[in-house]
Amino acid sequence: MSAVWPPVLTAPRAEPARSSVPAWLRTPGAVLVIASLWMAAATNPALWRELRTVSILQAPGGLFFAGALGLAVTAILVLLGSLLAWRWTFKPALIALLMVSAIGCHFMWRYGIAIDASMLTNVLQTDPHEAADLASWPLLMTLGGLGVLPAWAVWRWPVQYGRWPRRAGRNLLLALAALAVLGGTLLASYQPLASNWRNHKQLRYLINPLNTVYAAGALAVQPLRRPPGPLQAVALDAHLAPPLARPPLVMLVLGETGRAGNFGLNGYARDTTPALAREDVASFRDAWSCGTSTAASVPCMFSHLGKQGFEARSGEHENLLDVLQRAGLAVLWLDNQSGCKGVCARVPHVETAGLADPLLCKGGQCLDGILLKDLDARIAAMPAERRARGVVLVLHQMGSHGPAYAERSPAASKRFTPECIGNDLQHCAREAIVNAYDNSIAYTDEVLAGAIGWLKTQTAQYDPAMVYVADHGESLGENNLYLHGLPYAMAPDVQKHVPWITWLSPGFQARRGVAMDCLRAQAGAHITHDHLFHSMLGLAGVQTQVYRQDLDAYASCAPT
Ligand SMILES: [Zn+2]
């Protein structure tokens, strides 16, 4: 065992006399330049592909532009590396960067994703099961070839750092040289660089590994820019409308990765929603998400600020659930996903993964049917005085979470075959991917119909209602894009167009004065996640100055 700690950081002792490596190659500068060239050239296939897709590469001067871009990326990497080219930081930092580069390369190339701060937030918030869902042989091979192998070479390389004053001088020279190369490259390619940068904003999210470094930097300074401060209260005046014969029971099913266009109810060529079609439901066909990922959408959906206000917010605010609870309702969040992204922090919540139901759960993940289990007991356990005023249940689905779509539906519910099994989407035929995805929608259809079935058993004590809204959509291989999470401005509609389905019991229709026929006639109304906060307040009968009728999707069908 090495007596030096930490052992990984210990550079293998260089023995100049016996090393066959020439002295100039044993400097941090040389290693840094080679590794940077490697990352710029070898881990950027997604960037080169995009340059071709947008016809930059084929245009006159295209190759020159690509070369200049590669050189600029190399220079920036050398510049960053020169800050860390010290004995104890150089190799760990370079190895980490090589690994990040390889991982980024894999996901950008295979799934067409781009890496920005919100994508990185999703990655950091992911749980081990989600991570395991993404592990695949191609990932391991890319990681091995582009990451582990060069990282191993860096680790073994006999680097000589010299004494620290000399090292500081060399690092400064390295940084100045990188700056000079960067400046020269930018000047020489200023024209095409400026116009392409402006016209093809997606390129900046594809430059590996600088996109990840930049996103990590943006996330790191976020808390500095936005002091969290005390939690800001919302709707302190929230109170309930005068009670009617029965209290409301509103179930909000928070869908996951739902594409509006793949719902039979919305006119999809395949009948993916036969069970809902038998129920008295209304579907808004023109509903749009706040973000393109769970981490971006979910907190925004429950905020009173709306997309614009939410993205420009300062500090943390209370959300819909806080307001419902303050008004006196019993609120419960059931989670069959990787958590509620902070939304349920101050209301009772239950994670279903711990239930280990033998029929519905496997390996720590459960099918969404688990959300409907023991609902009677869960309601009975809520405080009686709150229940008497009304109940709001939020069911956070696993839904159609990819890429292992086939795992989102039980064998008995699979109606479209063959399915793409596993998570390596690019090795599956397009139809097999869509089959697996559509099976997950068909299972969501079963779960939602099951929820309605249970709600119908509650009509003696409550006036029940159900609202199902997905957090974002999904790309299923259109234009070689997969999954979701592209920056909103460049994301295709399929990642943003979400299902929004409503069922109101006859008792609920009477209490709100909302007729299902009227809602169905409103199917084409343009609504967004901005409407969810106000629509839920309206349904739950909560009154406050914060409520906006123009953002209540049900208000136009209700008497004022
Ligand atoms: Zn999601």
Image: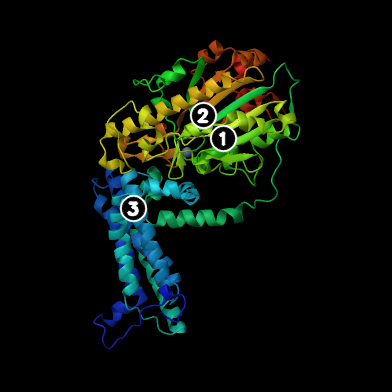
Q: Secondary structure at mark 1?
A: helix
Q: Nearer the viewer, residue 483 or 332?
A: 332
The quarter of the picture where the N terminus appears is bottom left
Q: Which mark is residue 469?
A: 2
Amino acid type, callout 1: Met
Residue 58: x %, y % from top left: 23, 45
Cβ–Cβ under 8 Å for marks 2 and 1? yes
Tell me, for residue 105, which label it has, or none: 3
Give SS at disc 3: helix
As drawn, is 39 to the left or to the right of 244?
left
> Where 56 falls versus 92 (above or below)?
above
Of circles 2 and 1, the one toward us is: 2
**Can you give x and y, in whole percent of width and height, for residue 557 in the image?**
60, 14
Tell which circle, 3 or 1, labels the residue nearer the N-terminal end.
3
Give the amino acid type for the residue marked by disc 2 in the picture. Val
Q: CA distance from mark 2 to mark 1?
A: 10 Å
Left or right, residue 52 beside residue 219:
left
Q: Secondary structure at mark 2?
A: strand
Q: Earlier in the sequence, mark 2 or mark 3?
A: 3
Between 408 and 168, the one nearer to me in the picture: 408
* CA distance separating discs 3 and 1: 31 Å
Residue 74 position within the rendered picture, expressed as x and y whole percent measured from the top left? 34, 62
> Which of the image's four quarters has the C terminus?
top right
Residue at x 29%, y 82% (from the top left corner) = 23
Which residue is at 42% across, 30% downward? Answer: 259
Above/below status of 557 relative to 53: above
Compared with 503, 498 (above or below) is below
The kind of residue on which mark 3 rests is: Cys
- Residue 9 appears anywhere in the view: yes
Residue 301: numbered disc: 1
Instruction: Decide if residue 545 is in sight here.
Output: no
